[in-house]
Amino acid sequence: MAAASSSDYDGCGAESNEANSKWLDAHYDPVANIHTFSACLALADLHGDGEYKLVVGDLGPGGRQPRLKVLKGPLVMTESPLPALPAAAATFLMEQHEPQTPALALASGPCVYVYKNLRPYFKFSLPQLPPNPLEQDLWNQAKEDRIDPLTLKEMLESIRETAEEPLSVQSLRFLQLELSEMEAFVNQHKSNSIKRQTVITTMTTLKKNLADEDAVSCLVLGTENKELLVLDPEAFTILAKMSLPSVPVFLEVSGQFDVEFRLAAACRNGNIYILRRDSKHPKYCIELSAQPVGLIRVHKVLVVGSTQDSLHGFTHKGKKLWTVQMPAAILTMNLLEQHSRGLQAVMAGLANGEVRIYRDKALLNVIHTPDAVTSLCFGRYGREDNTLIMTTRGGGLIIKILKRTAVFAEGGGEVGPPPAQAMKLNVPRKTRLYVDQTLREREAGTAMHRAFQTDLYLLRLRAARAYLQALESSLSPVSATAREPLKLHAVVQGLGPTFKLTLHLQNTSTARPVLGLLVCCLYNEALYSLPRAFFKVPLLVPGLNYPLETFVESLSNKGISDIIKVLVLREGQSAPLLSAHVNMPGSEGLAAA
């Protein structure tokens, strides 16, 4: 079903019709039922017949019924179910023997499924992680009937809250059960050994020893336990293992494993870490101001898309080169490489239904689609060298072919230095006072520097003392302990004599709710009256802002105001977790009376 359903215009901003468009609309199917993202798309000559197919790791509608689909042209050639949701798909050469038929690797859950000629060839499973010793001891006691299921649940919950290592799947499933189902579950699984398994979050390929396009490649895996693994392409053994401070979500590699390589990993903590050969830990770190949504390497520049609707260009040492603001949120990114013209550019699919193509910060082309694009793939498809494949949020499939006569011209974005750099500044002439100050700084420069350093050290010392005092007395509105990650701020509304005091309490942890908190207000009873000066706080779900409201009655008719201290306490503890001092305004109602 072919349809001219989308249009494009060049960087100059002029709308184009089918005659002068750079793309041919080859196919559009709004109900293709393909739900995936860019990492799960791959183009390869799977049978060695020169006919390139599209491999899709399909999530299925709503993330259910994941399947591996292989498309030839607009039609699905083969389709097979997957045991878990796919994380990434890649094609690579395992050996140099003729005929050179690429293998297909699909990462799903804790395994990598390798196919040759679209038939299962090998299954690589991630090595199991050592279980928590306390968790192992609890299940051993349950096996010997030394503890009952209710005690086992309480102990596992305390381990989950305090231990850094996550619990095993068996323990997590046990904690989700009702009280009536626990005993049967324990009797069924108490004899099983505790296994803790991580999963794959991202995958890419790295050339083994040659930079040629048809050279043997290794698989590089990023896992949930903050590790990077490099696999041997023939034996599928782990050649190298590297650790990261956070979980990797996007990978970009360059070089060869046996010679020298550089690996960039964008992680969930909002940082990008650069690793090199023989380095077990990151060598450089790029700190982003927002979470990354894509990472593409264009020549020697790392292009990062962020949740702040912008593209950033960085060197491999972390120096920012440029930033381009997008008109909408970035949903997906991928590389556009046109070998015939030596062009490498970044494609970004936006939430407003646009696909923008950039070379550095220069806008080359904009493609409009009928629905927001969630995955992009550019390369040889069928027998066409330059084919763009897009899937939409509603499950549609769009295939476009780049015209052989198309030339991308830089029309958007500013290239080179800005025009203001060529303007001459109106620098004032040197005055007598300026000359005298210059001579004084030359003569007494050492003494001035020492005085400045002394004042700076005193300022740092006072700030450290004030910070320590705030921590010891819980005067800070943000909790300093990791066990109680809370944040509090207060808002006063009204003219008086009755004010509305709203306390905004937030649980800043990522996954652990907080329960059993109290709020206490300390105030001058001669000036104010509070009907709710002490009350309980409901269960705090992570990430949500809970407004707690109370009313304050001003009793003074002289317009006097004071401070109300708000303390957040834990039941059974006298020391506050955090506090806030609310400067009450004067009662304008009483003053007017």
Image: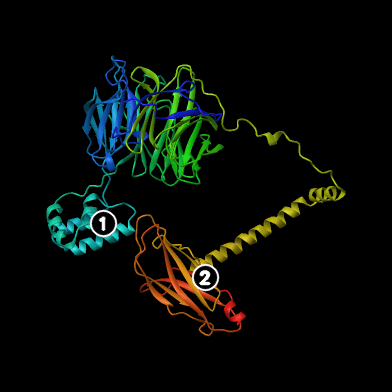
| Residue 4 seen | yes
| Residue 234 seen | no
Q: Position of residue 497 (x, y in %)?
A: 54, 79
Residue occupying image coordinates x 84% and y 47%: 435
Q: Identify the mark at residue 493; answer none if there is no mark.
A: 2
Q: Amino acid at mark 1?
A: Leu
Quarter of the N terminus within the rendering: top left
Q: Amino acid at mark 2?
A: Gln
Q: Position of residue 126 (x, y in %)?
A: 27, 38
How many angstroms separate mark 1 from mark 2 (CA)? 51 Å
Secondary structure beneath dot 1 equals helix
Residue holding disc 1: 134
Q: Nearer the viewer, residue 494 or 59?
A: 494
Q: Position of residue 425 (x, y in %)?
A: 76, 39
Is 578 above or below relative to 114?
Answer: below
- Drawn side of residue 197 relative to residue 567, left or right: left
Is 172 above or below relative to 517?
Answer: above
Q: Nearer the viewer, residue 251 or 536?
A: 536
Residue occupying image coordinates x 43% and y 75%: 520
**The furthest residue to the right:** 432
Quarter of the C terminus within the rendering: bottom right
- Drawn side of residue 93 relative to residue 592, left or right: left
